[in-house]
Image (cartoon, rainbow, N blue to C red):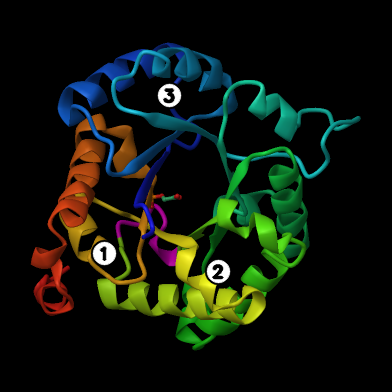
Amino acid sequence: MRRKIVAANWKMNLTHDEVKPYLDSFLTEVGEVTDVQIVFIPSYTSIPALAMALEKSPTPIELGAQNVHWQSSGAFTGEVGAAMLRALQVKYVVIGHSERRQWFGETDELVGKKVVTALHAGLYPLLCVGESLSEREENRVEEVLERQLRKGLGDCPPQDLSSVVIAYEPVWAIGTGRTATAAQAQEAHAFIRSVVASAFGPAAAKSIRVQYGGSVKPEIAQALMSQNDIDGALVGGASLDPVASRKSSETLLKRCAQPARFTEANATKIKL
Ligand code: PGA
């Protein structure tokens, strides 16, 4: 049984002194949650403040980072290494986010190296893959996903694959307000699982968690999460409002607690 995972990617938002008020507000809304794994992903400078605040959280919330360098240490001015993150109680790390691919020139090869470095340091990579709008329009979704997955996971030791979470984030949906339909996302997630099956075997494909990301909002989280191959959400913009973030988690919780209500037939009736 794959445990649902909801991660809040704050991107370049929230200073260290805004973290505690955010957390207090989130916890007031959400109460005690254990069924769904929640991960907060602040910018580097807010990690220590969040780590400290989370120590007293009644709801277990994991700490994530938005990036990591592909070398463990060395002369790389301005970069942050995996061991530095581990030393701050960081557990998850986003790797290959489309904003890093687009604005910072990160290639599939670099992404693959980062995955290995993160695993080696004991971090759980949150590997982002997804096609651009033109790639979708050219019917190249599967080709792009397969390339990104094969390179991103190419050097991942098979025994470490269970530590990886994949995030399907179509680039055209990120920060645009244009969410993939549940059917589009399910199709991509099923394909991702088939690529993992061909590379690592059917058991690995069945157990790996695949999140959806791209303009996830509380009102559509339920339809997405009721799909067979969608195991959670990577939420950007909506996570900056702790109340909206709480609602996303809540719909996921309902999905976990009452699976019978969210049959495939019901899911297709939910209009996005
Ligand atoms: P968004 O961002 O929810 O604002 O589209 C998602 C992401 O970039 O991970």
Q: Nearer the viewer, residue 106 or 166?
A: 166
- Residue 229 lies in quadrant: bottom left
Task: Residue at 46%, 71% (x, y): give it.
Answer: 206
Task: Residue at 34%, 52% (x, y): give it.
Answer: 4
Residue 98, relative to residue 68: is it above or below?
A: below
Quadrant of the image containing the C terminus: bottom left
- Residue 37 lies in quadrant: top left
Please, what is the three-letter code of the amino acid marked with disc 2?
Ala
Q: Which residue is mark 1?
A: 224
Residue 150, relative to residue 112: is it above or below?
A: below
Region rendered in magenta: 172-177
Q: Which residue is mark 3?
A: 14
- First in sequence, mark 3 or 1: give its number: 3
Mark carried by residue 204: 2
- First in sequence, mark 1 or 2: give its number: 2
- First in sequence, mark 3 or 2: give its number: 3
Label 3, label 1: how far apart the Cα atoms are: 27 Å
